[in-house]
Image: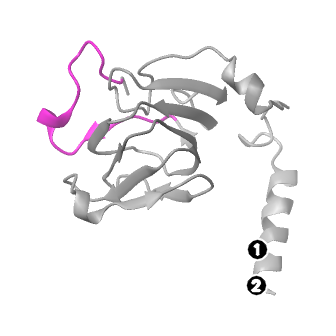
Amino acid sequence: MKLTFALTVSAVALLANPSSAIGQMAQRRMTAAEIATQPHSGAIAGTSGLAGIRTIVLSGDPAKAGIYTVELLVPAHTRINAHEHRDSRSAVVVSGTWYFGYGNKAEDATVKALGPGSFYTEPANVAHFAHTGDSAVAVIITGDGPTDTRYATSTDAPGPATGAKP
């Protein structure tokens, strides 16, 4: 009953406010094969800034206000140190095994192995970290921009040549 009421209120709010970010979202449908042909970038707003990670913007713009969705393609044997974002985000693992954890220090003992179809969140201003194993990982992340990336320890941040800009 409470869930039905909450969903109804949410739907009414969206219909009553067509200028919301979701109300402004363009129609877009892509198969996995079409996504694979989209242009890739490296470090953009809200990414780790590590060399080798490829980013595909599927919808919106992470650097601007509004809903955005990106796919991260993370090579095997990649470690992303503890960092946070100003926006709350949710994600789904598309392929590979993503070892994900929360905290101000990347510790292997606290990660959870997330395989294809797994879901996780990145709450605003909560440090998290991740790494890959022997295989590459694809993750689709949705947030409400603008986003940024702030490392828990400045020495953990990638160098200026590859650093993600807020």
Query: Mark 2 touching mark 1, by CB under 8 A?
Result: yes
| Label total for image | 2
Circle 2 sits in a helix, a strand or a loop, which is it? helix
Q: What main secondary structure does the magenta stretch of the protein show?
A: loop
- Location of the C terminus by quadrant is top left
Q: Quadrant of residue 134?
A: top left
Residue tagged by mark 1?
A: 6
Mark number for residue 2? 2
Quadrant for the N terminus, please: bottom right
Residue at horizontal 78 percent and vertical 35 percent from the top: 24
Which label was assigned to residue 127?
A: none
The stretch drawn in magenta includes residue 42:
no
Residue 72 seen in the figure: yes
Asked whether 92 or 27 is in front, the reply is 92
- Three-letter code, disc 1: Ala
In the picture, residue 33 is in which quadrant?
Answer: top right
Q: Is residue 159 magenta?
A: yes
Where does residue 120 sit, x and y in percent of width and height? Answer: 51, 58
Identify the magenta region: 146-164
Left or right of 41, for residue 61: right
